Image (cartoon, rainbow, N blue to C red):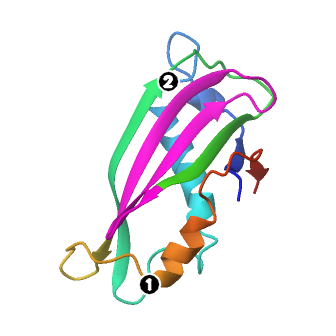
């Protein structure tokens, strides 16, 4: 499957005092894109005896993004699945042009609900996530 594309409208509340989108808001943009993927899987990742936690988010800022009426695209794809964790890669970009405003990675870990100890990614989640591996095809909007 192709990368998943989430179209996101910037808000005036996202601006910093310099008039561009604040760097901390990009983390929320990546979360919105991740959650659109995650919520499709049985309505989210809180099930039975497991939860999912975010272990790491990293963002590299490439270009300044200003508030505008057109949505910005957040392309997300599965980079890797391990035994207890998986990694999404992200690009915040122009939907039609080659401009990339930021790139990022999010590491999510499956944990036991009571002990919070890492637990293996089960086969149904693994199978679901594998459809988001980047195959080089154009992004598919949710």
Q: Quadrant of the C terminus?
A: bottom right
Across and down, in percent, residue 118 comes to 24, 72
Identify the residue shown where x is 61% and y is 33%: 92
Q: Give the mark nearer the N terminus: 1 vs 2.
A: 2
- Residue depicted at 56% across the width and 23% down the height: 21
- Residue occupying the far front of the picture: 135
| Dot 2 crowding, Cα within 10 Å, few <14, some 14–19, many 20+ | some
Magenta span of residues: 80-109
Q: Is residue 1 left or right of residue 119?
A: right
Mark 2 = which residue? 22
User: What residue is at 39 percent from the left and 75 percent from the top?
Assistant: 121
Q: Is residue 23 visible?
A: no
State the separation of the CA atoms marked 1 and 2.
34 Å
User: Is residue 54 shown left or right of residue 10?
Assistant: left
Residue at far top of view: 18
Whole-percent x and y of residue 81? 42, 63
Residue at 56% from the left image edge and 59% from the top image edge: 35
Q: In which quarter of the image is residue 111?
A: bottom left
Q: Does the CB distance between marks 1 and 2 fall below 8 Å?
A: no
The secondary element bearing badge 2 is classed as loop
Is 98 rendered above or below residue 108? above
Whole-percent x, y for residue 97 in the image = 78, 23
| Residue in the foreground of this view, choosing between 90 and 17 | 90
Magenta-drawn stretch, dominant element (helix, strand or loop): strand
Label of residue 31 in the image: none
Is residue 107 one of those drawn in magenta?
Answer: yes
Q: In this view of the protein, which residue sits in the foreground, 68 or 119?
A: 119
The 10 Å Cα crowd at callout 1, few under 14, some 14 to 19, many 20 or more, is few
Residue of label 1:
47
Say whether residue 110 is left or right of residue 137.
left
Q: Quadrant of residue 133?
A: bottom right
Task: Find numbered disc 1 in the image and state the secondary structure of the residue it sits on.
Answer: loop
């Amino acid at each position: 499957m192709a990368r998943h594309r989430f179209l996101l409208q910037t808000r005036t509340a996202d601006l910093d005092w310099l008039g561009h989108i604040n760097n901390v808001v990009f983390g929320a943009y990546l979360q919105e894109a991740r959650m659109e993927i995650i919520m499709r899987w049985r309505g989210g990742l809180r099930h039975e005896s497991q939860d999912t936690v975010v272990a790491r988010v990293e963002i590299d800022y490439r270009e300044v993004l200003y508030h505008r009426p057109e949505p910005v695209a957040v392309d997300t794809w599965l980079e890797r699945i391990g035994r207890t964790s998986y990694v999404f890669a992200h690009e915040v970009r122009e939907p039609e042009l080659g401009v990339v405003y930021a790139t990022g990675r999010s590491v999510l870990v499956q944990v036991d609900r009571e002990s919070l100890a890492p637990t293996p990614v089960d086969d149904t989640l693994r199978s679901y996530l594998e459809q988001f591996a980047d195959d080089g095809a154009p992004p598919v909007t949710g």
